Amino acid sequence: MSLNDDFLAMRRLGEVSKLLCHPSSLDKVWQETMADAPMPALPVLEEIMARLRVALFPGFFGRAKVWRESIEYHVSANLDSIYRLLSEQIRRGYCFACKEQDLCRDCEARGKEGAIRLIDALPRIRDLLVTDTQAAYEGDPAATSAGETVFCYPSMWTMIHHRIAHELYKIKVPLIPRIISEMAHSSTGIDIHPGAQIGEYFFIDHGTGVVIGETCIIGKHCRLYQGVTLGALSFPKNADGTLVKGNLRHPILEDNVTVYAGATILGRITVGEGAVIGGNVWVTSDVPPHTTLTQEKAHRA
């Protein structure tokens, strides 16, 4: 490249910089970030999730070898780091929401409270995850052990993220639960909104392409296969044309429901206890308990 080429390139860079910084363009995407309130940091949240996996399943994750005799020391030190890192990220999430809604109220204290409430919930979250590992092992003939499902299965990776994100969602922590959910989504192809309520012994076999909406309620001992959608049938709008937020728009699956690959279940409908939804079925009305719904039956309905 000649000196003249360099000069032309630099001049072009300056022109593009002016275009990107022009108020008519910049105002559409500008996110105000004050020195004490930057956006949440993805690498830090990834570290937090890595530390939480170690705390929940010691020996499965992390580089350090641990001994049972000293496990309490390792867990305590790890929880201390989680608390400090997470409280700061939750604070940033609150500051982001405060700027959006103009209602800032002591974000630092709320960040610390949110972090300690999640840590308080970890024993209960572990109990739920243990049931998920049992469901994965018992539900997949290819699984050689429950431990294999913890370390290898995308369902378990996703559920670790979801159980944590859901706990933060319940206490109304802004932004952070969605980031944690999207971490799992990007690595597994399983998209679960942090608001979805999922009972014990839950398993997604294979998993790729599964979508579970915000207001879904899933009972105990339910199993989904790849490509299943539990979504909304329609999106009501306000008088000004904007979408109504927070309405109950996703399905309810009662206990012991199985949904096979490619099935689509839409709207605030109930799939009754023990029902089986066959592959590639489109469902928009209630399914009675202990019903087996196949493509042929769905077409007739």
Image (tube, helix red, strand yellow):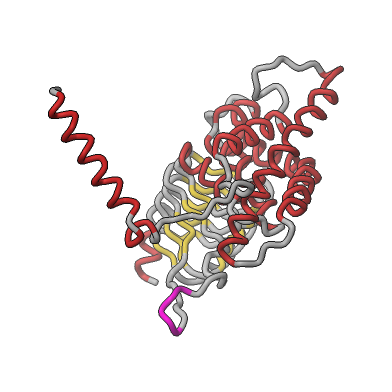
Q: Quadrant of residue 76?
A: top right
Q: Where does the magenta region start and end? A: 239-243
Q: Residue at x 45, y 85 (%)?
A: 239
Q: How many marks?
A: 0
Q: Is residue 240 magenta?
A: yes
Q: Residue at x 59, y 31 (%)?
A: 149
User: Is 55 left or right of 11, judged from the image as shown?
Assistant: right
Q: Nearer the viewer, residue 35 or 31?
A: 35
**37 w.r.t. 148: above or below:** below
Q: Quadrant of the C terminus?
A: bottom left
Q: Main secondary structure of the magenta part?
A: loop
Q: Nearer the viewer, residue 152 or 23?
A: 23
Q: Nearer the viewer, residue 8 or 134?
A: 8
Q: Position of residue 250 (x, y in %)?
A: 52, 65
Q: Position of residue 114 (x, y in %)?
A: 74, 50
Q: Residue at x 19, y 34 (%)?
A: 9
Q: Residue furthest bottom?
A: 239
Q: Is residue 33 magenta?
A: no
Q: Quadrant of the N terminus?
A: top left
Q: Position of residue 139 (x, y in %)?
A: 58, 39
